[in-house]
Image (tube, rainbow, N blue to C red):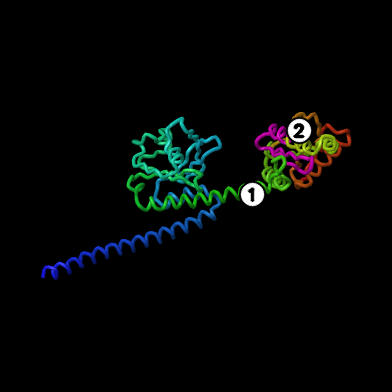
Amino acid sequence: MVADWILPGTLAVVSAAMAARVLGYAATVREREEDLATVSHLARALATAPEARTAACAAARNLTGASWAMLWEPLADGAFMVTAADGIDLPRIRLVPGREPSLVIRAAQEGRSLTVPDVHRDADANPRLVTLAGARSALRMEPVLQGEEVLGVLVVAWEDARVASARRVRRLLPLLATEAAVSIERADLVTRLAGLALTDDLTTLGNRRAWDDWIGRALNAADGASGAAGTVSVALLDIDFFKRFNDTHGHQEGDRLLRDAAIAWRNRLRPGDHLARYGGEEFAVLLPGCDEENAAIVIERLRAAMPLDQTCSAGIAAWDGREPAHELVGRADEALYAAKQAGRDQSVTAPTLVAASA
């Protein structure tokens, strides 16, 4: 009788427990399905975003309802700097390991997520950043990893500390960081490939394709502008007797001469100027906001920096305000030819053109 009474009750308890476990499992499955759908959507958005880093910050903020999100990335010297943000603007601050407390550096060094319920009570919180960022409550540091390499740290902030510890945040932010790592690496690879397509292998200067883009942009920017903003000058520099130098010293020394000339000249130009390897031993210089008189001064400065006791000739031309890029470069080429015909080791400026009235 006792067994008959106990058995139904026991079965009822077991059935209820099993039902609870089944319901819990079903809820977990639904959550994971929702997570996968969310991450899949984020992955597509990051893959097609024009700027992967900014898109990752925006996604983190939208995903978690955060006040702001920012991405810190390591520099070559080991310091960290903000490279993207959403919902906040920060000056370019460097965080140097060992110099000051930093949750960012701690998360990077440990390679794991950090949740900080109260940023004002954490000994590793950087006081400068707390003040600048206006962080009044909780932070989460999410390392952006590629394998074991730390590509950066995604920092997300909330006013409500409970949100930082919410299960959905703990589930989804690591997944987002993984997708961000893939997107950032892909974006950097595309940038590197684009750079290779526009870079001369030997000198690391821009090539002819880069030159065509630079001069087109410069003339468009100067078109219709007044004063110095409307002036553009170009120059072609050709190393004198380069074939003879190659034949005498060998091609390795010839390559060295090209590289050293590129370095010497690049270091003597303004940040807005452009230097390209135009072909062989010929280089092209683009000088926005520079008239022919000042261009001649710049080119003489470059010629004086010619390495290995060699010389070069140059042709200079100032834009007339209307001619297309190929005609402007053609006039510089004619001036270069004149310099070489006159004995080399000198520069010649093409005659000034006066644009016809409209």
Residue 299 image label? 2
Q: Position of residue 327 (x, y in %)?
A: 79, 46
Q: Amino acid at mark 1?
A: Leu
Q: CA distance from mark 2 to mark 1?
A: 32 Å
Other-residue count near label 1 (Cα within 10 Å), few / some / many at <14 / 14–19 / ≥20:
few
Residue 193 image label? 1
Q: Is residue 86 magenta?
A: no
Residue 104 image label? none
Magenta range = 260-288
For this view, does 71 lie left or right of residue 314? left
| Disc with the residue nearer the chain's start (2 vs 1) | 1
Q: Position of residue 159 (x, y in %)?
A: 35, 44
Q: Is residue 76 above or below residue 148?
A: above
User: Is residue 130 something one can see in this rendering?
Assistant: yes
**Label 2 secondary element:** helix
The answer to which quarter of the image holds residue 232 is: top right
Q: Is residue 283 magenta?
A: yes
The answer to which quarter of the image holds residue 105 is: top left
Q: Amino acid at mark 2?
A: Ile
